[in-house]
Image (cartoon, rainbow, N blue to C red):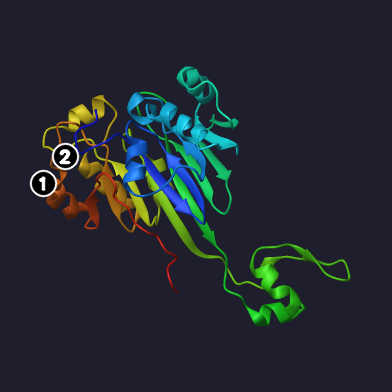
């Protein structure tokens, strides 16, 4: 349930003028506006699952996009039945000036190529079908002038090839960026999962992530059985996942309404995984490529 200083679940990412939203709980639009951000450049909305606290903010957001005279298509990604669920909610938002395209997650893992980044969807374990997501921004290798000369690539093509273009020279030879670049460098990985028990898929997809945003429904002692019953995680289970995956940092989120001071439990969490912090409304970070 929403609390006075805690809205429901949502995560927005921004990259080179493109925005992505994961989940859209009640109050999502207010949170975005509080940050001074906009929903207008939204490329896609990914839903982990269809419980109300993760999707109840969608009709209002769609109406806001419509009132902003958006005409570009909006991609909505979610578990099996996503089109039916969204169209049911659209009873109160029936007329929109833009088309909605749907991507239904039917397999345990999906890879979706976006404009300059990739979305990885992976099935987790809740009491309904639920997915986690990784947002991955690749990084090309460094320019290697020796390699360019070895492959007899004229200098006039170097700049365009570094930008990822595929070209054809005067002799009809196809030129690709790997002919002038070294091995791909480490990119950026953000992994987001909530409403799940610990499963190996989370560790696999969060491996070496720059940030893992992970549910921690319970921090109090004696909540382990309840977490197992309702298919959620404790703070300490999330910390063990972060440690095993070797992530750079962990943000806990999706607290029980009864857990109003998550920071009280962080001492025990950090004994398992030191670089953990309690998430809160409006928390943001800029993830940059690592310098080599």
The image shows residue 105, relative to residue 281, as above or below, that is: above
Q: Tell me the tag on residue 9.
A: none
Q: Which residue is mark 2?
A: 219
Q: Residue at x 39, y 55 (%)?
A: 209
**What residue sits 26% from the left and 44% below the top?**
281
x and y, in percent, of residue 251 in the image = 28, 49
Q: Secondary structure at mark 1?
A: helix
- In this rendering, the count of numbered labels is 2
The answer, for residue 255, to whether it is visible in the render is yes
Q: Pointer 1 and pointer 2: residues touching (CB < 8 Å)?
A: yes
Percent position (x, y) of residue 67? 49, 33
For residue 154, side relative to residue 38 (left or right): right
- Give the crowd class for mark 2: few <14, some 14-19, many >=20 residues within 10 Å: many
Asked whether residue 204 appears in the rendered view, the answer is no
In terms of depth relative to the viewer, which is nearer, 186 or 95? 95
Viewport quadrant of the N terminus: top left
User: Disc 1 designates what residue?
Assistant: 264
Q: Secondary structure at mark 2?
A: loop
266 versus 124 height, above or below: below
Q: Give the mark nearest the N terminus, 1 or 2.
A: 2
Q: Is residue 235 above or below residue 60?
A: below
Name the residue located 60 percent from the left edge and 37 percent from the top edge.
71
Q: Nearer the viewer, residue 71 or 185?
A: 71
Q: Quarter holding the C terminus? A: bottom left
In the shown orientation, is residue 257 left or right of residue 108? left
Taking 245 as reference, is 289 left or right? right
Which-is-in-front pick, marks 1 and 2?
Answer: 1
Locate residue 170, reporting x and y percent: 87, 71
Q: CA distance from mark 1 to mark 2?
A: 9 Å
Against 173, residue 251 (above or below) is above
């Amino acid at each position: 349930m929403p609390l006075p200083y805690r809205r429901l679940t949502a995560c927005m990412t921004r990259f080179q003028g493109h925005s992505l939203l994961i989940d859209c709980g009640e109050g999502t639009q207010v949170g975005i506006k509080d940050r001074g951000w906009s929903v207008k450049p939204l490329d896609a909305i990914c839903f982990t699952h269809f419980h109300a606290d993760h999707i109840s903010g969608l009709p209002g957001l769609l109406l806001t996009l419509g009132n902003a005279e958006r005409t570009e298509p909006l991609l909505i990604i979610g578990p099996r039945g996503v089109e039916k669920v969204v169209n049911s909610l659209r009873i109160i938002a029936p007329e929109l000036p833009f088309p909605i395209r749907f991507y239904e997650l039917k397999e345990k893992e999906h890879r979706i190529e976006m404009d300059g980044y990739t979305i990885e969807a992976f099935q987790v374990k809740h009491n309904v079908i639920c997915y986690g997501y990784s947002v991955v921004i690749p990084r090309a290798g460094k320019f290697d002038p020796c390699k360019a000369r070895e492959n007899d690539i004229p200098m006039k093509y170097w700049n365009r090839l570094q930008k990822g273009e595929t070209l054809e020279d005067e002799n009809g030879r196809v030129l690709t960026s790997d002919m002038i670049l070294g091995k791909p460098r480490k990119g950026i990985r953000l992994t987001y999962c909530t409403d799940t028990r610990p499963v190996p898929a989370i560790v696999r997809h969060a491996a070496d992530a720059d940030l893992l945003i992970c549910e921690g429904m319970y921090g109090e002692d004696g909540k382990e059985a309840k977490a197992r019953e309702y298919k959620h995680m404790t703070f300490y289970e999330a910390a063990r996942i972060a440690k095993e995956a070797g992530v750079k940092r962990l943000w806990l989120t999706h607290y029980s309404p009864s857990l109003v001071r998550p920071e009280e439990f962080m001492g025990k969490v950090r004994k398992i995984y030191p670089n953990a912090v309690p998430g809160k409304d409006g928390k943001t970070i800029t993830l940059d490529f690592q310098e080599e």
